[in-house]
Amino acid sequence: MLKKRIACGLAAVVLALSGGIGFADFGAFDMEIVASADIVKSGKCGDNVSWELDNGGTLVISGEGQIYNYDNTSDKRSPFEASKIKKVIIKDGVTSIGSYTFYYNMYIEDITIPNSVKSIGKYAFMYCDNIKSLTIPANVDEIEEGAFVHCSSLESIVLPEKLQVISHDLFSGCSSLSEIKMPNSIKSIELYSFEGCSKLNDIKMPEGMTKIGYKAFFGCKSLTSIELPKSILQVDEEAFLECTNLKTVTIPKSLNYIGEKVFGYSKGNGVAGTTKIEDFKIYCYKDTAGEKYAIDNGFDYELLEDIHEHSYTSKITKAATCTANGVKTYTCDCGETYTETIPATGHKYTAKTVAPTCTEKGYTLHTCSVCGDSYKDSETAATGHKYTSKVVKPTTTAQGYTLHTCSVCGDSYKDSYTDKLPAPVATKNSISKTTAKFSSTAVSYTGKSKMPKLTVTYGGKTLVKGKDYKVSGKNCKNPGKATITITGIGNYTGTKTMNFYIVPKKPTLTKATSTTKKKISLAWKKDSLADGYQIVVYSDKTCTKKIKSAMVKKNSTVGGALSGFTSGKTYYVRMRAYKTIDGKKKAGAFCAAKTVKVK
Ligand SMILES: [Zn+2]
Ligand SMILES: [Zn+2]
Ligand SMILES: [Zn+2]
């Protein structure tokens, strides 16, 4: 069928024009003379798609959904087949262009395809010989076989990025096509797809493409060099046959199937044979299908060096710290290395509040949990000591002082020192502190110095005269007030004075008689040391029953008489001398009593 189609040429056009639905009543090629654009024809070309043609040759197709699929052999021919349409505007909403829709439209120069279109059917633009350029919208992901067969004026076409297959015969016979940019999505170029594209001189096949089909570039006589993509796996028989100017082919390692006479052959003379293209050279890799093809076919070839692509593995060769950058080293197996800087991580501080003490400020301490670096801030004042004072008394070996101690931290200091106590001296007891007692308060005059028995005690202990004290006296002889001085000696010191009385001696009653009725006459010896005398008369011999007492106030009086007694009765008379001391009469002892019988 393909062979048949390639063979048909202009004869087919004539057939189509005469046999098709066509626009037989539209007039032959005379649209240009019509001045205004009137709708001259309309119809349906899809279930929900309609068309209108004006008399200027502009066809507008609008509606929703697909344009019918037509063919060129049955009664399902396109209403536009072999028409004289010049311009086609397909409105948004139409989703496909059906098979053979614009078959044999040799006058179409301009066609607008909307973004709503997703597919283009087979042979849809076959023999549209007047289209020079075409943009296939981005949503189209399928263009069926032969859609642009023999668009002989087509110089450039923009293919959508969703397209994966250049279907067979797609651009076959597009003899003006000089350049085509393959979308990166293309995976395979099917058989005959660029057959006879004799102007095609630049074709870049995308990485990812795996297959080139049978005679895909047959007769592309303007191609001079081909570099197959690194992904290519299969190139079928005669794919580049008759590319008579193709002098170099670069074959990647990936290519593992190369059909017969793919590269380097022309059809040669005659039907049977093929001949090698002169100066043809293959660039390939050692031990690959490319090299085998060159050897098997006897072509000049050149082995390519493996282009090493670095494959790096990375390793941290110097870890970043808080403050210093680290280094990451990338190394390829080939030894090539490069480094990358790892930025310093920066400190990770955690804060801790430290309370002030008596003497130290408080603060917030920021410490890096990673490296330990720290700094302080937010200082608070020291609290100061809280001293309490205690006075410590001096001893004989140490000074006294006031001790100040902090109740919080225990810190202490001393001040207000006081002198040590004097060293202890042998202590002497003071006589004044002793107790001194006389055995009596008075002694009688003897003509000699004397005093009552003296006892001195201290703390229950009796002091020894001559060892502990000595005694000196004054006025200790005659009647009166005597004074003694006790002076401490030995372990005692100081003095103490004491007094006692010396009273007159017993007087001498020389006479006690009664010569006159009821009277007693008395006489005694004078005591010049006394101040006076007392005479007492008793009725009993033991002198307990006192009858009469008389005071003699002059010591010079040495006799007298007492009256008033009972005649014939016996009385007992005795006397004593006295001395007035401190205003009081201090008497001595009585003399023995004399017995008197009164007359
Ligand atoms: Zn490397
Ligand atoms: Zn740190
Ligand atoms: Zn303190």
Image (tube, helix red, strand yellow):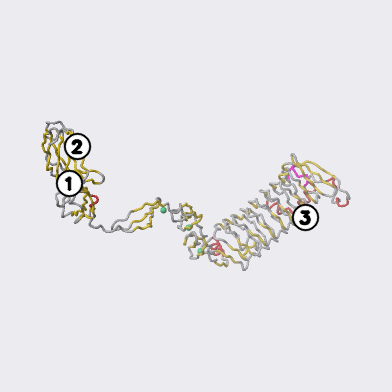
In percent of width and height, residue 38 lies at 86, 46
In percent of width and height, residue 539 lies at 14, 32
Closer to the camera in the image, 59 or 438: 438
- Tell me if mark 1 has few (under 14), some (14-19) or many (20+) residues whose alpha carbon lies within 10 angstroms of its own: many
| Three-letter code, disc 3 | Asn
C-alpha distance separating marks 1 and 2:
19 Å
In this view, 557 is above or below 568: below
Disc marking residue 504: 1
Left or right of 44 in this view: 555: left
- Name the residue tied to disc 3: 130
Q: Does the magenta stretch include residue 499?
A: no
Discs 2, 3 touching: Cβ within 8 Å: no
- Name the residue tied to disc 2: 549
Closer to the camera in the image, 94 or 23: 94
Per the rendered image, the range of residues in magenta is 73-80
- Tell me if mark 3 has few (under 14), some (14-19) or many (20+) residues whose alpha carbon lies within 10 angstroms of its own: some
Residue 381 visible in the shown view:
yes
| Three-letter code, disc 2 | Ser
| Three-letter code, disc 1 | Pro
Which mark is first along the chain, 2 or 1? 1
Left or right of 295 in this view: 118: right
- Callout 2: SS: strand
In percent of width and height, residue 26 lies at 85, 46
Residue 437 visible in the shown view:
no
- Callout 1: SS: loop
Closer to the camera in the image, 421 or 234: 421
For the view shown, which residue lies furthest in the bottom direction? Answer: 279
